[in-house]
Amino acid sequence: MIRIPRAPLNVAAASHPGTQGRQNEDRYSVSAYRLSETSRTASVFAIVSDGIGGHRAGEVAAELAVETISHLVSQSDGSRPLEVLDGAIQSASEAIAATAKDNTQHLGMGTTCACAWVIGNRLFTGSVGDSRIYLLRGDVILQLTVDHTWVQEAMEKGILKAEQVRDHPNQHVIRRYLGSSKAPQVDNRIRLAKDESDTQSRSHQGLRLLPGDVLLLCTDGLTDVASDREILARVRSRGSAANALQFAAQGLVDLAVERSGPDNITAVLLAVPGTPRPKKKKINPWAWAVVGLIVLCLVAAVLVAGGWLALDVLLPHSPTPTPFG
């Protein structure tokens, strides 16, 4: 792909180390490309990584993930996005593990990653860990990715309920991360409904984005302290125009800071230019019944009128008396 200076999407990002004076171990990147010299199709690749390991150089792992994955994506032609994403993420994980092995100060470091690759108007994703990708469409917000955490697995098995997660001691126990001794499985699910199967979720890859859609990539420093509805309200209150999107990204980070969010906070927004198409109003079934009844009555009236007219034409007329002179 060929790097271009201006992305076809509106882009904004903000990051903050949190309220506990910790080093910011979050990293992110957004890059814009054209598929080839002859192709007009543009693409945008965004990635967010949340380093883990603290003093063991989580920020090194996150930086290495962002650089490695972004570089490998840029070397592709966009024809096999999922294959490229999976290979890039696996390569980054191996590079992190090798770096940690060569430096005892980095031993045990790792990172999450959430990748969104928009080619034309189609979305492709890959994720590992608990950094998330959301789709904001109209007045709806959908968490497209699935967290790879102990509490998520517990909820799926019915051990925990959603309301028990926020303060659970295992809330931040991650089951998959880049840099582990065994390469993690990349998650390509795009979850559009809670009750759909994994196969159905994977079939949504290449999801068509619509005018006014906004993608949010974020670390758990935001989602730990803000609900989905609060995130939606904060973004929609600013709008998706290029000059307003940065205020929205900063507003999300400010919201987490206002809640005394202790973790690093990062939010990246990608907005499709244009205004959402108005939803078609659903007509009440009873309204359809009334309309049908009116039409039926009109048809019956026409038939009756036509019948009388036919009788008037076909029946013999009585002769009109003529007065004699």
Image (spheres, rainbow, N blue to C red):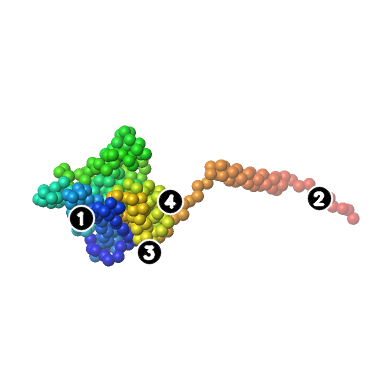
Report the label total.
Answer: 4
* Residue 109's disc number: none
- Extreme-right residue of the structure: 325
In front: label 1 or label 2: 1
Mark 4–mark 3 CB contact (< 8 Å): no
Give the foreground label among 2 and 3.
3
Three-letter code for the amino acid on which mark 2 is drawn = Thr
- Contact check, label 2 and label 3, Cβ < 8 Å: no
Amino acid type at image mark 3: Asn
For the residues marked 4 and 3, what is the alpha-carbon distance in whole angstroms? 21 Å
Q: Position of residue 246 (x, y in %)?
A: 35, 61
Q: CA distance from mark 2 to mark 4?
A: 75 Å
Residue, disc 4:
139
> Mark 2 packing: few (<14 Cα in 10 Å), some, or many (20+)?
few
What residue is at 27 percent from the left and 46 percent from the top?
A: 130
Disc 3 on helix, strand or loop?
A: helix
Depth order, front residue of 189/103: 103
Binning the other alpha carbons within 10 Å of mark 1 as few (below 14), some (14 to 19) or many (20 upward) gives many
Q: Which mark is residue 63?
A: 1
Residue at 81 percent of width and 50 percent of height: 320
The residue wearing badge 3 is 243
The reply to whether discs 1 and 3 touch (Cβ–Cβ < 8 Å) is: no
Going from N to C along the chain, the mark reached first, 4 or 3, is: 4
Q: Identify the residue shown where x is 33% and y is 35%.
A: 160
Q: Position of residue 112 (x, y in %)?
A: 24, 48
Q: Is residue 273 above or below residue 188?
A: below
Of the two numbered discs 2 and 4 in the rendering, the one whose residue sits closer to the viewer? 4
Determine which residue is flagged by label 2. 320
> Counting residues from the N terminus, which is met first, the one under dot 1 or under dot 4?
1
Toward the left, the furthest residue is 102
